[in-house]
Structures are given as structure tokens and as C-alpha cells.
Image (cartoon, rainbow, N blue to C red):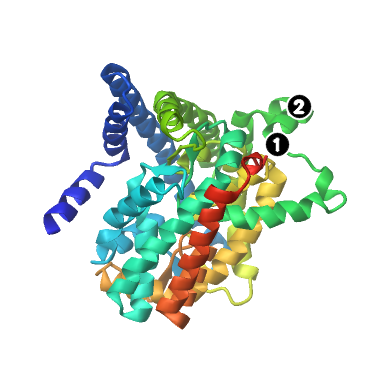
């Protein structure tokens, strides 16, 4: 068992730019795509991911110091530090339980696909750290290893269900045909955005606001261009960070570059995914005429969308302000400020790319995340200590993204209060909805947008 786990860990450590091309090349061969075409598709995906990560790294490298300057300038002092998803994933995979998340997630995915209870074939195995995170937290409160494993199974079921439900929105809004986002920090935003969108559709005045990149460009000309929008937003962030003129202009141009380059990197990645996605759907339809198959990818594919990225950048100073004025909050947003595009990626799709609604939804999401992240902070801190994570002088840590998502509150909360009964109840409800959604729901209702 250790040999298998070590081999899987070695494979995952290759990184997405190597791991995904290999997985998808093998998958393409299974689909009987010609080896040359399959190899080129896999390599193009790897190249696209490298380009995507370079642009995301450019954003993180420049946004992080600006956010740190804003925290210092605003004089923010809260007891719990947001360590961000990179550190949270290290904690999640650093426990014995967490190290089993990848085989648990892969086996669950295969079983659910076999029985037709999900449409998502999840190839982004690195993101199983999300279920490792909740499994480790439930283990902290229960000291039950088996319950921690069961928690990971139930959590991944929730993620696949939400990914399937949100897929039509994702595909239409972002033009990502055959793609779903089984990502633990993004998918739960679907159930938050649905009622918010319904409410805003029925508020006079609000329901007339249409603020998309296209409408902005139509009304404001050059100021609606994604590059110009990025420049303006970057300059605003630079001013809030109290940068000098040189650093402010540099941040503005860098932000503009990110908004322009990110969609092009996603297009390159999708160029590689297209033949595999088409082959997968042809393969499935030839054997199961009434079934669809989605390729499960990271929500980074939507991070370059103008609505998502511009809204997320505007939410950075708003998140810091909200953290200060929200009564009962103990979390200082920091590490996950650059993760805001992922947190709102699915929500923006439900809002049909509307920037106004995405910012409103993002604010609601941030408020909820701050409260949940504050509540879960003692458990995250304990889990970090169990994983021998370097606390760097912090006595209390949390995570705004995964630590603040509603699914963490539901799973860990019921696991803490009801143990096996709580997690079992969530699992049963999720399974029933999966059966209804995939087996009994009328085909005419599969399109939500």
C-alpha cells in the first residue's frame, strides 16, 4: 500500500503541466484517438498550463505585496491569519489521512461514472487536497480515522454533483464546451449564486443593471477594453497600497497584461482539450446514448475571464474592508486574496458574466467565508500542528477559501455534532440527489441557461 501511495505522490509531484498531459494522452488512446493527435493534444495542454501558471504567478507575485501593503496601511490587526490555499494543501496532504485522498477520490470517481451518477471525469487529481482538508478536520474533532476516510468520499460526491449541475453555466458563459469544475473552493459557489441571482432578478432597478465587459466597452469605448480595465484596476490597487508613481504604474501595466494574456493561455489549453473532449463524448454516446461526459478541470480555466478577474481584483480591497467591519470576524485575509478569482469563478457563470452581480455575490461569499473561517480556525490550527506545519509565530491560522466555504461548515459541523450519523446523513442526501439528477430528471431540464 505504501508503494502505491508513494508512486501516486511521485506522479502528482510532477505538477499539472506534466501530469495532465500524460493522463489525457493515455485517456485519448483509450478513446481510440490516433497516437499522433493524442500526443499533440496532451503536449498542447501541458504548454497551456505552463502559460496559465506563468500568468497566474505574475498576478500573485504583484498582488501579494500590494495586499500586504494595504493590510499595513489600513492598520489591520486580527487574531487569525489566512494562510492561503498553498499552505492549506500542504497541511491537508501532510497528514496520514490526507495522503490517501488521491486514491479515495479516483476510486470514487470511477465508481460514480460506472453507475452513471456523475458526468464528470476528474483529471485534475491534485485538487483532491480539498477532500483531504475536510477529512483531516473531521479527524481532528472525532479522532476516528475511518470517519475521516468516509468524510472524503462524501465530500467528493458533493463536489461532483455541484460540478455536474454548474457545468451548463460554465460551458455557456466561458465557452468551455464539455468542461466542468470539480474544484472544492469553486463548485460550492453554485448553490450560493443561484438564490442570489433569483433575488436580483426580482429587485426593481437591480434587475435592469447589465454590467458585462461587452456592455462596458459598448458604452465606454476604450475604457471597456480588458487591457484598459486591468490598467485602471491595477492603478487603483497601487494607490490603495500607497505605492509611489513608478510602482503604481508598473502594477497597472502588469494587471493589464494578466487580463489580456490569461484568456489566450486558456484558449491554448482548450485547443488541446477539444479533440479529447469530442472523442470522450463520442465514445460515451456510442455506448450510452443518453449520457454526457464532462472533463473535470481546475477553475483556473475561468480565472482569465474579464468578468471574473476584474471582479476579483476589485474585491481585494473590499475584502480587507469587510474583514474590519464584520462583527465577530477574527480572520485577517491575506494568503487567499489572490485566490478570489477561483472563489467566484462558478458564481460569475451563474450571473451570466455580469460584473455588478459578481461583485455583489462575491461580497456575500466573503462575509460568509470570514465567519466560517473564524469558526474553523481552531481545527485548522490543530490539523497544522498534527502535520508538523511551520506556524511561523502565528498562534491561530485559517483558510479563507476552503476553510470558509459552506461545504466545510456543513461537513465538519455535522461531523463534530453527530459523528457518523451527520456525515452519513449528508452522504445519503447527496446520493439521492445524484440519482434524481442523473436518472430521473427530464432531459429537457438539463440546460439551465
Is there any visible trace of residue 61 in the rendered image?
Answer: yes
| Secondary-structure class at tag 1 | loop
* Residue 363 pos. (x, y %): 65, 57
* Residue 271 pos. (x, y %): 43, 23
* Residue 244 pos. (x, y %): 54, 44
Q: Along the line of sight, which residue is nearer the eye, 397 or 13? A: 13
> Taking 58 as reference, is 324 left or right?
right
> Taking 27 as reference, is 429 left or right?
right
Which residue position holds label 2? Answer: 218
For the residues labelled 1 and 2, the Cα–Cα distance comes to 10 Å
Q: Quadrant of residue 231?
A: top right
The residue depicted at 16 percent of the width and 49 percent of the height is: 7
The residue depicted at 47 percent of the width and 54 percent of the height is: 159
Is there any visible trace of residue 237 in the rendered image?
Answer: no
Q: Along the line of sight, which residue is nearer the eye, 250 or 323? A: 323
Q: Along the line of sight, which residue is nearer the eye, 421 or 85? A: 421
* Residue 329 pos. (x, y %): 57, 73
The residue depicted at 44 percent of the width and 46 percent of the height is: 116
Toward the left, the furthest residue is 3
Q: Is residue 444 above or below residue 101?
A: above
- Label number found at residue 132: none
Q: Quadrant of the C terminus?
A: top right
If you read the primary sequence from the N terminus, does the residue marked by circle 1 or circle 2 appear first? 1
| Secondary-structure class at tag 2 | helix
**Residue density around tag 1, few if under 14, some if 14–19, many if 20 or more, within 10 Å:** some
- Label number found at residue 212: 1
The residue depicted at 69 percent of the width and 41 percent of the height is: 354
**Residue density around tag 2, few if under 14, some if 14–19, many if 20 or more, within 10 Å:** few
Amino acid at each position: 500500500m505504501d508503494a502505491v501511495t508513494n508512486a501516486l505522490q511521485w506522479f502528482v509531484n510532477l505538477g499539472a503541466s506534466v501530469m495532465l498531459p500524460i493522463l489525457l494522452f493515455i485517456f485519448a488512446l483509450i478513446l481510440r484517438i490516433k497516437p499522433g493527435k493524442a500526443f499533440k493534444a496532451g503536449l498542447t495542454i501541458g504548454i497551456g498550463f505552463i502559460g496559465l501558471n506563468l500568468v497566474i504567478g505574475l498576478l500573485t507575485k504583484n498582488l501579494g505585496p500590494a495586499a500586504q501593503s494595504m493590510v499595513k496601511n489600513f492598520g489591520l490587526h486580527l487574531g487569525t491569519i489566512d494562510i492561503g490555499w498553498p499552505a492549506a494543501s500542504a497541511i491537508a496532504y501532510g497528514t496520514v489521512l490526507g495522503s490517501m485522498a488521491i486514491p479515495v477520490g479516483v476510486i470514487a470517481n470511477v465508481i460514480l461514472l460506472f453507475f452513471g451518477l456523475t458526468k464528470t471525469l476528474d483529471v485534475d487529481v491534485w485538487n483532491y487536497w480539498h477532500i483531504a482538508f475536510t477529512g483531516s478536520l473531521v479527524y481532528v474533532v472525532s479522532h476516528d480515522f475511518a470517519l475521516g476516510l468516509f468524510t472524503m468520499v462524501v465530500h467528493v460526491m458533493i463536489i461532483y454533483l455541484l460540478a455536474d449541475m454548474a457545468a451548463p453555466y460554465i460551458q455557456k458563459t466561458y465557452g468551455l464546451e464539455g468542461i466542468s469544475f470539480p474544484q472544492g473552493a469553486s463548485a460550492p459557489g453554485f448553490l450560493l449564486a443561484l438564490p442570489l441571482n433569483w433575488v436580483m432578478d426580482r429587485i426593481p432597478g437591480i434587475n435592469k443593471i447589465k454590467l458585462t465587459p461587452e456592455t462596458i466597452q459598448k458604452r465606454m469605448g476604450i475604457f471597456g477594453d480588458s487591457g484598459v480595465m486591468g490598467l485602471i484596476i491595477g492603478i487603483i490597487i497601487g494607490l490603495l497600497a500607497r505605492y509611489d508613481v513608478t510602482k503604481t504604474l508598473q502594477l497597472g501595466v502588469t494587471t493589464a497584461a494578466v487580463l489580456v494574456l490569461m484568456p489566450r493561455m486558456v484558449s491554448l489549453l482548450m485547443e488541446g482539450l477539444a479533440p479529447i473532449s469530442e472523442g470522450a463524448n463520442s465514445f460515451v454516446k456510442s455506448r450510452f446514448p443518453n449520457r454526457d461526459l464532462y472533463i473535470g478541470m481546475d477553475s483556473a480555466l475561468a480565472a482569465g475571464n474579464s468578468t471574473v478577474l476584474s471582479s476579483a481584483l476589485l474585491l481585494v480591497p473590499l475584502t480587507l474592508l469587510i474583514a474590519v467591519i464584520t462583527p465577530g470576524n477574527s480572520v485577517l485575509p491575506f494568503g487567499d486574496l489572490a485566490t478570489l478569482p477561483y472563489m467566484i469563478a462558478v458564481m460569475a457563470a451563474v450571473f451570466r458574466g455580469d460584473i455588478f452581480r459578481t461583485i455583489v455575490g462575491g461580497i456575500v461569499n466573503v462575509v460568509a467565508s470570514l465567519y466560517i473561517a473564524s469558526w474553523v480556525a481552531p481545527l485548522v490550527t490543530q490539523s497544522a500542528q498534527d502535520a508538523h506545519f511551520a506556524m511561523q509565530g502565528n498562534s491561530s491560522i485559517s483558510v479563507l477559501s476552503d476553510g470558509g466555504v459552506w461545504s466545510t461548515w456543513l461537513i465538519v459541523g455535522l461531523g463534530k455534532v453527530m459523528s457518523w450519523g451527520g456525515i452519513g446523513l449528508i452522504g445519503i442526501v447527496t446520493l439521492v440527489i445524484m440519482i434524481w439528477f442523473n436518472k430521473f430528471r427530464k432531459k429537457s431540464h438539463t440546460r439551465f441557461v
